[in-house]
Image (cartoon, grey):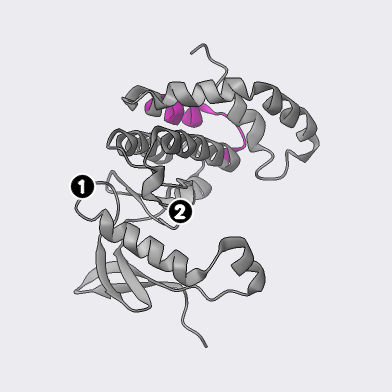
Amino acid sequence: MSARRIEKTFVAGQPGWLKRVEHVGLRLRLQKGDPRRLFEAERSAYLSLQDAHLPFPKVLAEGPDHFVLADAGPTVRSLLRRSGSEAPEVRAALVAAARALAGLHAAGYSHGRPNLCDICWQDGQITFIDLENYRARHNTPGGHVRDLLLFLFNLCAETGRADASVLAARDAYRAADTKGIWQAAARRMRQTRPLWAVLVALTRPLRHKRDFRAIAAFVSLFRDPQ
């Protein structure tokens, strides 16, 4: 049996996650790109960020076809799915994730795809993982806006509604934002409001589908006066 792409391991007694080059068929190769290129891009991203004092895991070990990242605890998505968004721990994790994302942007960096499955929460600390989509050229205000919109959309896809915890996460980012990223995101949403209104109407029968159910809640996050 072939080795798993990602598995738990230990390096000098420290828990970590070993990640190997993914082996995929033609369809996924066409969709995602060359696995070796993505693997090397992610490894290079982690190594380039090691000394930046940012919330990314340390590389504990590496080899020609693998690297090991320090364990950073459960993902925010796993906590949300296990306990629900209204659980105090989950709300705290969501708020901390939003603040950490704003801090990342304040430092001039974009994650690339800050979905809840790519954000870990342990001992009150947020750690961003899965840097396959990280690119230094996206460390721009435009890249930060994209990060924020992806984060909020994914959050709404998980909850299906803009409940108190979702609003708390939104407000936490807005309060911690020092670069005007929230305002830029809100402007982008205003510019595309007619499109979103049509999408909400057209996809109403598909609200039981994960991504479609996010649309109305996501749009509602930007309806407050800016």
| In the foreground, 144 or 156 | 144
**Which numbered tag is attached to residue 133?**
2
Q: How many marks?
A: 2
Eyeballing the image, is 145 above or below 211?
Answer: above
Q: Label 1 near label 2: C-beta < 8 Å?
A: no
The kind of residue on which mark 2 rests is Asn
Residues at marks 2 and 1, CA–CA distance in whole angstroms = 20 Å
Q: Which residues are magenta?
A: 159-172
Which residue is depicted at the point 25% across and 72% down?
A: 61
Element on which disc 1 rests: loop
Compare marks 2 and 1 and give the one earlier in the sequence: 1
For residue 102, side relative to residue 218 (left or right)? left
Residue 121: where, in percent of width, then height? Answer: 35, 48
* Residue highlighted by disc 1: 53
Mark closer to the observer (2, 1): 2
| In the foreground, 219 or 62 | 62
Element on which disc 2 rests: loop
Mark 2 crowdedness (10 Å alpha carbons): few <14, some 14-19, many ≥20: some
Which residue is depicted at the point 58% across and 74% down?
A: 24
Residue 117: where, in percent of width, then height? Answer: 47, 52
For residue 34, side relative to residue 61 (left or right)? right
Eyeballing the image, is 53 above or below 43?
Answer: above
The kind of residue on which mark 1 rests is His
| In the foreground, 91 or 171 | 171
